[in-house]
Image (spheres, rainbow, N blue to C red):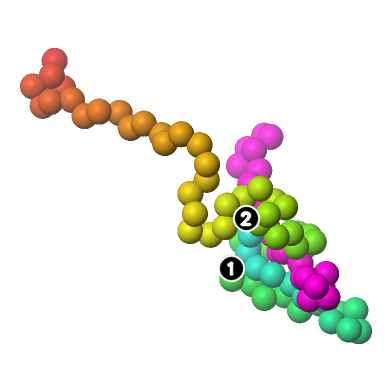
């Protein structure tokens, strides 16, 4: 439990226009006994900005664990038209 209290999640915020920003997880961080931090990045943000937040287990976040599909109805895909109808 002590390790979980010292764990952090590292994000970068990508702006995609007015009112559209996405939080992208880029790594994890750990607080050392002396108060310093170690950051382990899987990616380097192009904007040079990092957000470090408290780590939350998947059960508390509501996100499915990696590899599992989120709950909900499957998305329908448009049906392709036969070539003869597509030209009309």
Image marks 2 and 1: residues in contact by CB distance under 8 Å:
yes
Q: Quadrant of residue 80?
A: top left
Looking at the image, is 7 positioned above or below residue 71?
below
- Decide if residue 55 is on the left or right side of residue 76: right
Residue 52 location in percent, x, y?
77, 62
Question: Vertical placement of 83 versus 33: above or below?
Answer: above
Residue count near mark 1 (Cα–Cα under 10 Å), binned few <14, some 14–19, many ≥20: few
Q: Residue furthest bottom?
A: 34
Q: Residue at x 70, y 51 (%)?
A: 61
- Tell me how far mark 2 sits from mark 1, CA to CA: 10 Å
Return the x and y of residue 88 as percentages of the image width and height.
13, 15
In this rendering, would 79 be left or right of 4? left
**Residues in magenta, as a range:** 1-24
Q: Residue 44, percent across and down?
A: 61, 68
Residue 47 showing in the rendered view: no
Determine the residue located farthest toward the top in the rendered image: 88
Q: Which quarter of the rendering shows the N terminus?
A: bottom right
Asked if residue 13 lies in the magenta stretch, the reply is: yes
Q: Does residue 42 appear in the picture of this structure?
A: yes
Secondary structure beneath dot 1 equals loop
Q: Quadrant of residue 36?
A: bottom right
Question: Which residue in the protein does label 2 denote?
Answer: 24
């Amino acid at each position: 439990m002590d390790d979980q209290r010292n764990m952090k999640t590292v994000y970068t915020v990508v702006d995609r226009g007015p009112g559209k920003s996405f939080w992208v997880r880029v790594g994890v961080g750990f607080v050392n006994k002396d108060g310093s931090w170690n950051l382990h990045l899987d990616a380097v943000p192009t904007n040079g900005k990092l957000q470090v937040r408290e780590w939350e287990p998947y059960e508390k976040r509501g996100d499915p664990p990696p590899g599992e599909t989120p709950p909900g109805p499957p998305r329908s895909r448009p049906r392709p038209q036969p070539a003869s109808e597509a030209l009309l």
